[in-house]
């Protein structure tokens, strides 16, 4: 019976305090690192469906309700600006609230039905202001990131600006890759020096040995438990399942899992690993490093997706449990916000109550700075 507990990790942990060579120490460290990465991937695989379910069934319906109430509040403030009971200072505050709230709802949530209200109170109109902001952001991107927009590029909104910038960066990457390939072809046309030939030969030999190392493990496993050689139906079924594991691990170049299977099936023992030559361990380490890099890329993709969905910073660390706690917190906060805005809508229908609230309301200072535009720019860009 195959153990669920990773035997190699136990072996690596037991040998970590012994006087091993640097190569063997790296081998055991890589084993432990890959095991941690696999465990984290497994937790993410279990967590992501729960997170997405909470977003779809709990968070998004609440968000739509909250946005609808915010829109109702904008309409209420718009109606109030035409009531004689509200004097000049009151109307100034109402207009500022309308522009801030409607601008956010249109730009961030696509509630374009509020544009007529916004335009009624703005100095120009929403589309003109958005185009102006996008053009200024494009200038900043040109000066900071070196992206040079053409006159025909549509940068009239944050979304179109992001698309244009992504296209520019994609083209620049392709052009750089083409230049690199042309340079490689140019160099390939030159006669190779003896040193270059020697280096290439060493590299090719190392790659052959690395491939041979994982093939050797694979062949031994296949020889020992190929189901076609098993007459007993029950045992053939068991070996078929094991062969599927072996083939999957070999396709992924998952040396750690192949060695685990060898240990579990008692084809080798921990002493066998300790007695491997330095050269063989070096080849194993190369495979394990590549495997670890691949796992790191998979983890980065998952975590980047989660950061974007949760509105987190691009470098903010996040753990599976934390993301579930975060969405639960956001759901609770939305419920509280909905209760509050419903109370406000009910209260502000009374002009006297709204007037009293406006008296205490202070218009915050606007900071039309480049820093604010940069925040907007990098929050909208998702390449």
Image (cartoon, rainbow, N blue to C red):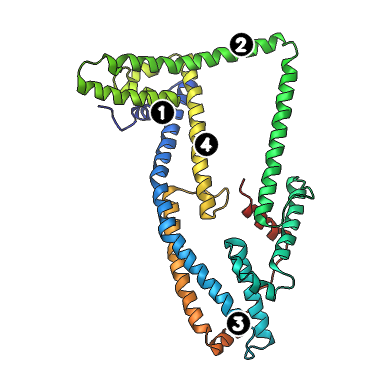
Residue 367 quadrant? bottom right
Cα separation, mark 4 vs mark 2, equals: 30 Å
Left or right of residue 261, residue 91 in this image: right
Who's the residue at 60% across and 82% down the image?
79
Residue 19 quadrant? top left
Who's the residue at 73% across and 60% down the image?
131
Name the mark nearer the viewer: 2 or 1: 2
What label sits on residue 297 in the rendered view?
A: 4
Left or right of residue 1, residue 181 in this image: right
Q: Looking at the image, tell me whether mark 2 or mark 3 is earlier in sequence order.
A: 3
From the image, tell me which residue sits under label 3: 79
Q: Looking at the image, tell me whether mark 1 or mark 3 is earlier in sequence order.
A: 1
What label sits on residue 16 in the rendered view?
A: 1
| x then y, percent, for residue 346 | 48, 82
Q: Looking at the image, tell me whether mark 3 or mark 4 is earlier in sequence order.
A: 3
Circle 1 crowding by C-alpha within 10 Å: few under 14, some 14–19, many from 20:
some
Looking at the picture, tell me which residue is in the foreground, 47 or 71.
Answer: 71
SS assignment at label 2: helix
Residue 268 higher or lower than 29, as above or below: above
Is label 2 in contact with label 1 (beta carbons under 8 Å)?
no
Q: Is residue 18 something one can see in this rendering?
A: no
What label sits on residue 202 in the rendered view?
A: none
Cα separation, mark 1 vs mark 3, equals: 73 Å
Q: Looking at the image, tell me whether mark 2 or mark 1 is earlier in sequence order.
A: 1
| x then y, percent, for residue 187 | 74, 18
Cα separation, mark 2 vs mark 1, equals: 35 Å
Is label 3 in contact with label 4 (beta carbons under 8 Å)?
no
Name the mark nearer the viewer: 1 or 4: 4
From the image, tell me which residue sits under label 2: 201
Name the mark nearer the viewer: 3 or 4: 3
Q: Looking at the image, tell me whether mark 4 or mark 2 is earlier in sequence order.
A: 2
Residue 200 higher or lower than 142, as above or below: above
């Amino acid at each position: 019976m195959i153990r669920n507990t990773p035997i190699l990790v136990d072996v690596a942990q037991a040998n970590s305090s012994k006087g091993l060579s640097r190569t063997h120490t790296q081998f055991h460290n890589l084993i432990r690192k890959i095991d941690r990465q696999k465990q984290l991937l497994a937790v993410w695989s279990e967590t992501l469906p729960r997170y997405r379910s909470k977003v779809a069934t709990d968070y998004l319906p609440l968000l739509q309700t909250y946005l609808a109430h915010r829109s109702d509040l904008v309409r209420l403030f718009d109606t109030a600006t035409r009531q004689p009971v509200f004097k000049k200072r009151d109307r100034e505050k109402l207009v500022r609230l309308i522009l801030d709230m409607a601008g956010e709802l249109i730009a961030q949530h696509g509630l374009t039905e509020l544009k007529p209200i916004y335009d009624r109170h703005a100095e120009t109109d929403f589309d003109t202001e958005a185009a102006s902001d996008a053009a200024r952001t494009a200038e900043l991107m040109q000066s900071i990131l070196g992206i040079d927009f053409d006159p025909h590029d549509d940068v009239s909104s944050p979304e179109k600006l992001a698309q244009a910038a992504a296209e520019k960066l994609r083209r620049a990457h392709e052009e750089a890759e083409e230049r690199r390939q042309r340079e490689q072809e140019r160099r390939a046309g030159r006669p190779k020096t003896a040193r270059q030939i020697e280096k290439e030969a060493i590299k090719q030999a190392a790659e052959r040995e690395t491939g041979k190392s994982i093939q050797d493990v694979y062949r031994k496993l296949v020889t020992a438990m190929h189901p076609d050689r098993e007459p007993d139906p029950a045992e053939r079924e068991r070996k078929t399942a094991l062969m599927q594991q072996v083939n999957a691990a070999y396709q992924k170049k998952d040396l750690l899992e192949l060695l685990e299977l060898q240990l579990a099936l008692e084809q080798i023992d921990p002493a066998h690993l300790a007695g491997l030559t330095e050269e063989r361990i070096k080849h194993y380490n190369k495979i394990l490093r590549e495997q670890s890099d691949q796992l790191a890329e998979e983890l980065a993709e998952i975590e980047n997706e989660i950061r974007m969905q949760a509105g987190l910073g691009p470098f903010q660390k996040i753990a599976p449990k934390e993301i579930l706690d975060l969405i639960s917190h956001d759901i609770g906060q939305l419920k509280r916000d909905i209760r509050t805005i419903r109370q406000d809508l009910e209260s502000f229908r009374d002009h006297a109550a709204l007037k009293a609230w406006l008296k205490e309301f202070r218009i915050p200072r606007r900071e039309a700075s480049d820093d604010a535009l940069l925040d907007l720019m990098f929050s909208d860009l998702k390449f």
